[in-house]
Image (cartoon, rainbow, N blue to C red):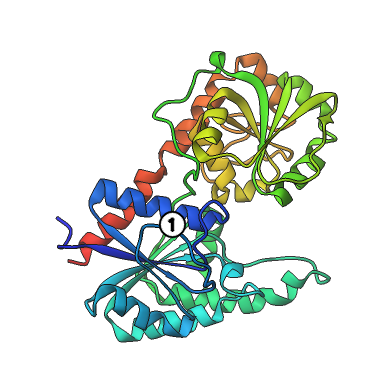
């Protein structure tokens, strides 16, 4: 058994359900930890004083007061902290230096074990982009945070490799790979392809959907090869096109998670504008795969990335026609089976096992 009255303190940059992917991730994890393992959650929010209606104890504070907040939530007893790391959430320049200072203070106190889930590491870009100039500071902060962890997890092999090979990280703690889970629910089994509509979903924030439509516009041939009859647009408002390459676009707006889940289970495809290297860190990709909806990319890739392979569990302009001719059943099943290996229960199990070791 896990120790009496077990509690995990989750550290997030903000706690705004339905408006922040990291917030939704942390809250769903809290629910699963309590339901499946009897582990309670409390939150420390470091970069926002915006009130929210979550039913968990929460303290909003500056990074310098992190240790005090954790001791208040644990009533002075030893405990465990899970930090959700997305650099721009904690700092305008993406370099969470104050968070690194705060965690070093917690580590020195020796009363809390520290786990970090690296949603992201650092930004990269060309010299005329701000990310280029901030990247060095971001990397340095990530080095420091990783060095002080007792448990390191991240969403992609690319991130894991970087964390593992960095010579500045002297810690022997191995980096564990755990791709993102879906923020809009999961299915115990995927709806058969024969029961789905020849529809493609475009889902996510306004900025990402704008990019998606720009990348979809020159892909009329792929849309034809897949037999797309309609595009469903799900997410915050912006100037969504009425049609794309002759295919009508139906605007759905912001929907409740159960409604999104229902729509994904009825559609065959979901479009992603992201780099193939970032598929495993994409909550949208996780949402598609969790419902057996086949992810479709604008870019092709030849090597397997984080267990995903073009033509097997994702499609691109290079593989779309052959996959449709083969019936699409294997693609949908492969996407769902890939997701099932790192679903919400798998994430919660990882932290429950880690807490048990602290007994």
Q: Give left or right: position of 339 versus 206.
A: left
Name the residue rendered at 56%, 72% in the picture: 90
Q: Which residue is mark 1?
A: 26
Report whether 213 appears left or right of 354.
right
* Quadrant holding the C terminus: bottom left
**How many labels sit on residues?**
1
- Residue 6 in the image: state x and y as whole percent: 22, 62
* Position of residue 147 in the picture relative to residue 359 (left or right): right
Vertical comparison of 131 with 250: above or below: below
Considering depth in this image, is 119 or 23 the residue closer to the camera?
23
Q: Is residue 305 visible?
A: no
Q: Quadrant of the N terminus?
A: bottom left
Give percent across and percent down for residue 219: 81, 32
Q: Nearer the viewer, residue 285 or 275?
A: 285
On the image, the x and y values in percent for residue 296 come to 66, 34
* Residue displayed at 47% across by 75% down: 145
Residue 359 versus residue 19 in the image, above or below = below
Determine the image quadrant of residue 327.
top right
Q: Nearer the viewer, residue 326 or 267?
A: 267
Q: Is residue 266 above or below residue 119?
A: above
Q: Is residue 250 visible?
A: yes
Give the vertical position of 344 relative to 48 (above or below): above
Q: Hey, which quadrant is residue 288 in on the image?
A: top right
Q: Secondary structure at mark 1?
A: helix
The residue depicted at 35 percent of the width and 61 percent of the height is 56
Label 1 CA crowd tier, 10 Å (few <14, some 14–19, many 20+)? many
Q: Percent position (x, y) of residue 122?
A: 62, 67
């Amino acid at each position: 058994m896990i120790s009496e009255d077990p509690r995990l303190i989750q550290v997030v940059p903000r706690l705004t359900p339905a408006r922040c992917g990291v917030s939704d991730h942390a809250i769903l994890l809290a629910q699963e930890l309590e339901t499946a393992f009897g582990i309670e959650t409390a939150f420390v929010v470091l970069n926002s004083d915006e009130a929210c209606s979550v039913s968990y104890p929460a303290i909003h504070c500056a990074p310098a007061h992190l240790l005090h907040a954790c001791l208040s939530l644990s009533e002075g007893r030893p405990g465990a902290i899970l930090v959700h790391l997305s650099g721009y959430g904690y700092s305008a320049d993406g370099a969470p230096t104050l968070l690194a200072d705060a965690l070093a203070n917690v580590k020195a106190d020796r009363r809390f074990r520290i786990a970090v889930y690296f949603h992201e590491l650092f930004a990269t870009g060309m010299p005329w982009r701000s990310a280029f100039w901030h990247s060095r500071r971001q990397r340095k902060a990530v080095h420091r945070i990783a060095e002080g962890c007792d448990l390191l997890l991240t969403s992609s092999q690319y991130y894991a490799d970087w964390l593992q090979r960095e010579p500045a990280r002297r810690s022997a703690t191995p980096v564990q790979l755990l791709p993102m889970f879906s923020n809009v629910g999961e299915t115990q089994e995927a709806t058969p392809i024969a029961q789905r509509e020849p529809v493609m979903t475009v889902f996510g924030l306004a900025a990402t959907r704008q990019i998606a439509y720009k990348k979809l516009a020159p892909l009329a041939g792929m849309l034809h090869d897949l037999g797309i009859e309609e595009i469903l647009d799900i997410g915050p408002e912006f100037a969504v096109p009425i049609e794309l390459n002759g295919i009508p676009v139906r605007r759905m707006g912001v929907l409740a998670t159960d409604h999104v889940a229902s729509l994904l289970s009825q559609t065959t495809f979901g479009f992603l504008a992201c780099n193939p290297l970032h598929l495993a860190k994409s909550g949208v990709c996780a949402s598609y795969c969790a419902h057996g909806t086949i992810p479709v990319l604008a870019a092709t890739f030849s090597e397997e990335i984080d267990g995903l392979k073009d033509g097997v569990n994702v499609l691109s302009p290079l593989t779309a026609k052959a996959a449709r001719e083969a019936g699409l059943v294997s693609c949908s099943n492969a996407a769902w089976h890939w997701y099932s290996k790192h679903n919400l229960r798998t994430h919660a199990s990882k932290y429950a096992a880690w807490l048990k070791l602290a007994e």
